[in-house]
Amino acid sequence: MAGYDIGKFNDIIVFYQNQYCTGRNDEILNYSWTCFERDGITWYINSIKSIIVSKPQPPAGCVWLFDDHCLLGNKIEVCQDVADINAAPYLFGNKISSYIAGPGVQGVFVYDEVNFVKPFTAAKEFYGMYGKAINKNIKSLKIVK
């Protein structure tokens, strides 16, 4: 990559360390940068591994769960604690690869067992679980408001 144009998007989140939107997101950019070399930032060239454009936002107090990395693919909305994400009405366990929380959510505890056993993380956002034990293995979750 030698540059980018934001175009119709509000911003992009750039990941330098890993593909699949994992690792530290080093920058949230809200401007176009059409030529890295001309602008003297050649270290950007071939360094960007994955991006998210115009991060969506769930309603207040809710969390969106996605079945792909970088907030892609199918999603469901959860606004309360769920003891078994595989049970009706969700039927979405063993599919979750990323999630994002809406306003008013302080964090999300995700568990690899039903009924809130064995917490894995309490992050508010998790853009890519590729290579992690929790990838497509979330069975319950608690929303901290």
Image: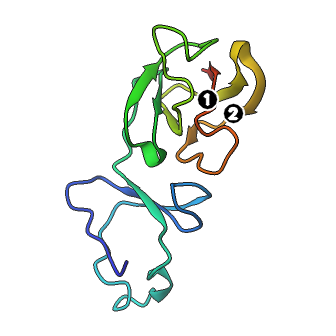
How far separated are the C-alphas under marks 2 and 1?
9 Å
Residue that badge 2 annotates: 122
> Crowdedness of circle 1 by 10 Å Cα count: few (<14), some, many (20+)?
some
Residue 119 is left or right of residue 12, and the answer is right
Mark earlier in primary sequence (2, 1):
1
Mark 1 falls on what kind of element? loop
Question: Which residue is drawn at the image coordinates 69% and 16% (left, top)?
Answer: 114
Question: Which residue is drawn at the image coordinates 46% and 80% (left, top)?
Answer: 46
Mark 2 falls on what kind of element? loop
Give the x, y percent position of residue 23: 62, 57
Looking at the image, the residue that sits furthest to the left is 8
**79 shown above or below 130:** above
**133 shown above or below 6:** above
How many discs mark residues in the rendered view? 2
Residue that badge 1 annotates: 106
> Crowdedness of circle 2 by 10 Å Cα count: few (<14), some, many (20+)?
some
In the picture, which quadrant includes the C terminus? top right
Question: Which residue is drawn at the image coordinates 60% and 13% (left, top)?
Answer: 81
Give the x, y percent position of residue 47: 50, 76
> What colouring style does the render use?
rainbow
Question: Which residue is drawn at the image coordinates 42% and 90% (left, top)?
Answer: 40
Residue 52 is left or right of residue 47, and the answer is left
Q: Amino acid at mark 1?
A: Gln
Residue 87 is left or right of residue 35, and the answer is right
Q: Amino acid at mark 2?
A: Ala
Q: Are discs 2 and 1 less than 8 Å apart at CB?
A: no
Give the x, y percent position of residue 119: 76, 28
